[in-house]
Amino acid sequence: STQIQLASRPEGWPTAENFRTVTVDLPDLAEGQVRVANEFVSVDPYMRGRMSAAKSYVAPFELGEVMTGGAVGRVVASRAASLPEGTLVLHQLGWRDVAQADADAFRAVPELPDAPSSLYLGILGMTGLTAYVGLTEIAPVQPGETVFISGAAGAVGTAAGQIARLLGAARVVGSAGSAEKVALLTDKYGFDAALNYKDAPVREQLPALVPGGVDVFFDNVGGDHLEAAIDVMNDHGRLALCGAISQYNAQQAPQGPDNLVSFIKSSLSMRGFTLGNHLDKAGEYNQRMSQWFADGEIRYDETVVDGIENAVDAFLGLMRGANTGKMVVRTA
Ligand code: NDP
């Protein structure tokens, strides 16, 4: 099995030197174990936080251990009756081409006849559920409202735009970092308008796109995007703080928004969340999303990088915006 380990903790932007690729021989299967050939391995922004030693909502990665995280694969050998050979499974054993462990480390998922299994890492999995929790529990969208989503062309963002609409939003606006992504948001994902934050400060661009103000802000980016959104929030507006990717590799503490007093004046509420505290919503999400998906209501994009040995490049590409929709590594 080829595996990627964390070799040292990055300061600022990670580099290839922070990781090590190793090949190990897998022992014979013990009773109750299965061996899984991964099809897709996930790379996600939250992994940057785990590369640092600081305690966060998920424990840091251990140096010299395999980078753990979401992956989907197929059972190729089994000594567990619950997971026969051929079963498609989801697991958290991360950046390796073959995973072997007790059966309870894996969860069987339904076959997707017309779509790649990587969707279980994206729209039918963690990132889709994150968007849903943000727009139903954290900053609930009411029919007729205006929603602004930062980082809108990524995995969580593309899901959030569509879910906002399905929940009845009247106007959905997004931000992204290239002209192509902005065009995709309006052409493919049904956003009413979108801005490229690299063209001019968000604070200058956003007001024209939300003439009636913003009722719900779903933030993946933080910093300048959060400040710009606070400027245009309507009374009783809600802000869901999902991510702050503009700050994950920063070595200096960022300046805070200069307009927090609006929370008082406009009775705003802002709430951060981590999906791990809302996994009780997964059943409801799977039910609603599989229906929307079957009805042809859902679009998605993936950026696929081939080869587990390229997982680090895929992760670094994700942090730079090389992806549209979900970034995944194909191992099969
Ligand atoms: P994405 O697919 O959105 O990929 C990351 C994107 O971030 C890139 O494509 C890039 O797009 C954008 N980006 C990078 N740097 C900047 C910057 N300085 N300013 C603005 N945009 C930037 O990743 P995910 O959908 O997986 O995650 C999105 C966010 O949600 C992240 O912040 C992540 O940490 C958070 N998250 C939080 C969870 C929770 O439980 N709270 C769970 C899952 C995700 P572009 O080209 O547009 O710059």
Image: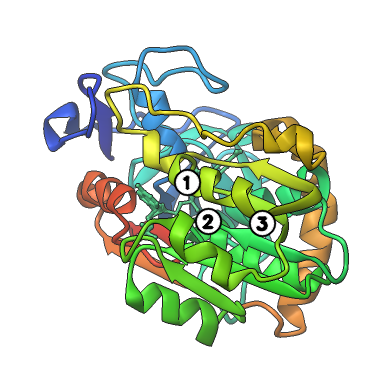
Ranked by sequence position, the earlier of labels 1 and 2 is: 2
Residue 277 position within the rendered picture, expressed as x and y whole percent measured from the top left:
73, 30
Give the vertical position of 294 relative to 6 (above or below). Answer: below
Where disc 3 sits, the SS reads loop
Category of crowding for the residue at label 2, using alpha-carbon neighbours closer than 10 angstroms: few (below 14), some (14–19), many (at least 20): many
User: Does ligand 1 reach within 8 Å of label 2's beta carbon?
Assistant: yes
**Residue 292 location, x and y as percent?**
77, 75
Q: Of residues 87 and 120, which is closer to you in this image? A: 120
Cβ atoms under marks 1 and 2 closer than 8 Å = yes
Q: Is residue 72 visible?
A: yes
Query: Gap in Å between the C-alphas at discs 1 and 3?
Result: 31 Å
Q: Which mark is residue 221?
A: 1
Q: Tell me the amino acid under the disc marked 1.
A: Val
Foreground of the two, 134 or 113? 134
Q: In the image, what residue occupies the spot 53% across and 50% down?
A: 228
| Residue with the mark numbered 2 | 150
Placement of 32 over or under 56, stated as above or below = below
Q: Position of residue 249 (x, y in %)?
A: 30, 33
The quarter of the displayed image where residue 164 is located: bottom right
Q: Is residue 84 visible?
A: no
